[in-house]
Image (cartoon, rainbow, N blue to C red):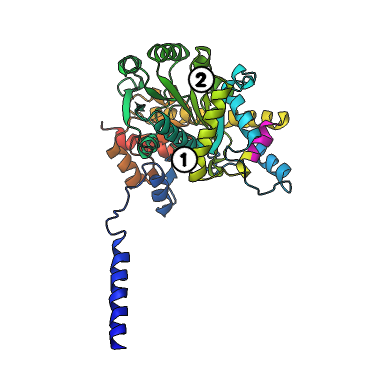
Amino acid sequence: MALSRKLVQQRSSVFGSRSMSWWRSVEPAPKDPILGVTEAFLADPSPDKVNVGVGAYRDDNGKPVVLECVREAERRIAGNLNMEYLPMGGSVKKVEETLKLAYGENSEHIKDKRIAAVQALSGTGACRLFADFQKRFRPESQIYIPVPTWANHHNIWRDAHVPQKTFHYYHPETKGLDFAGLVDDIKNAPNGSFFLLHACAHNPTGVDPSEEQWKEISKLIKEKGHFPFFDMAYQGFASGDPERDAKAIRIFLEDGHLIGIAQSYAKNMGLYGQRVGCLSMLCEDEKQAVAVKSQLQMLARPMYSNPPVHGALIVSTILGDQELKTLWLKEVKGMADRIIGMRTALRENLEKLGSPLSWEHITNQIGMFCYSGMTPEQVDRLTNEFHIYMTRNGRISMAGVTTGNVGYLANAIHEVTKST
Ligand code: PLA
């Protein structure tokens, strides 16, 4: 009896210590540079607080927006919805409509079935699926990433075990494109490298190449046999018109590239939490596209099996109906226009305050973000003294600026930058 009790005690102490030691070496992860800002904002009890961190659209009262076209699509879907699994590649109808936005309504490539495409878990999931595909089928390859870029790009390709290189993109002095640096880096990269390009409304800089520059970039990438992969997370947010914002992609298509595209409906349909996106890859022919799609599905299956159904149904309902699509286009333009208005207001407020600095770049940059040029220390002051929350790289989400807070924001920015 006594012996068996001792054994039990020994056993439980062995199991106890073993289970205790499993995660002992795990250190807390660093805060995410973007989503960590939202966490800090939510924890701040100040009534003055302003969140211009994450790129999430707000109306002029600072409230999250559900688009009217989405509400109407939900009304039409209600009751019709079954909760069955989608196929591994997602909703075929939703993918078809999504491809038209990127490749063009009358795209030959769509007709020729040369595009391998699957519904993905929003833009992030599309990038990750591509990175995993790249690693599986071109294991020796690297990815060239612009400096700077959306911080998560680095995590995505790191976790897919793809080595990363960078290329010049933004010129801090001109606050514009470092075109010469970019061209050099394309030329100097080993032939057949992968290049990550933001299709429009570059995050975080708000600086896009001009049409002429895109043509030049496309030509050089072709000459070097590089693979262009487009992250298109903001189609519609640059110009207000999704068709115009697809210009860079169309230039590459005209030049005969095989390309990859990550698309997202988070921003342009306001479907952030629905996680609806698409990964597509233009292939040489239909046979190759079928093979590539099957391999993309093979990557998705052990990761999440199949993508969520609800957001896909919203998208296909809107884009498959002319009236709802027209309403959507109007609402995208409305969001882009409000942001453009806030750029002007922020710049004017800073100039009125007598700021000694030039704020021209606020209105020159496009898309959701203003890359302000503020230092991490200045951003820290904005947060600590004014309860203004933004990423430490000086990026302001213009989508969070409103007529109500623009004066307060300008004043705070002036206070922390006037002595520099
Ligand atoms: N690609 C770029 C360039 C992005 O800026 C974002 C989102 C995504 C992809 C992914 O978006 P999705 O997965 O939601 O479709 N960037 C945000 C949010 C808006 C974030 O960091 O996740 C940002 O504040 O930068």
Q: Quadrant of the N terminus?
A: bottom left
In the picture, the disc for residue 7 is none
| 9 in relation to 380, above or below | below
Residue found 39% across the figure and 43% down from its top: 389
Task: Between label 1 and label 2, give the one nearer the viewer.
Answer: 2
Vertical position of residue 290 compared to residue 121: above or below: above
Q: Position of residue 339 (x, y in %)?
A: 51, 31
Q: Magenta part mainly helix, strand or loop?
A: helix
Amino acid bearing label 2: Ile
Q: Which residues are magenta?
A: 313-320
Residue 22: x and y in percent read 31, 60
Please say whether residue 315 is one of the residues in the magenta stretch: yes
Number of residues whose C-alpha sits closer than 10 Å to that of mark 2, classed few (under 14), some (14–19) or many (20 or more): many
Name which residue type carries label 1: Asn
Q: In the current view of this chain or complex, which residue is farthest to the bottom? A: 1
Label disc, if present, on residue 405 of the rendered structure: 1
Element carrying mark 2: helix
Q: Which mark identifies residue 249?
A: 2
Along the polypeptide, which appears first: circle 1 or circle 2?
Answer: 2
Q: Secondary structure at mark 1?
A: loop
Q: Is residue 336 visible?
A: no
Q: Residues within 10 Å of mark 1 (few under 14, many from 20)?
A: some
Residue 197 relative to residue 120: left or right: left
Quadrant in which the C terminus appears = top left
Is-magenta flag for residue 297?
no
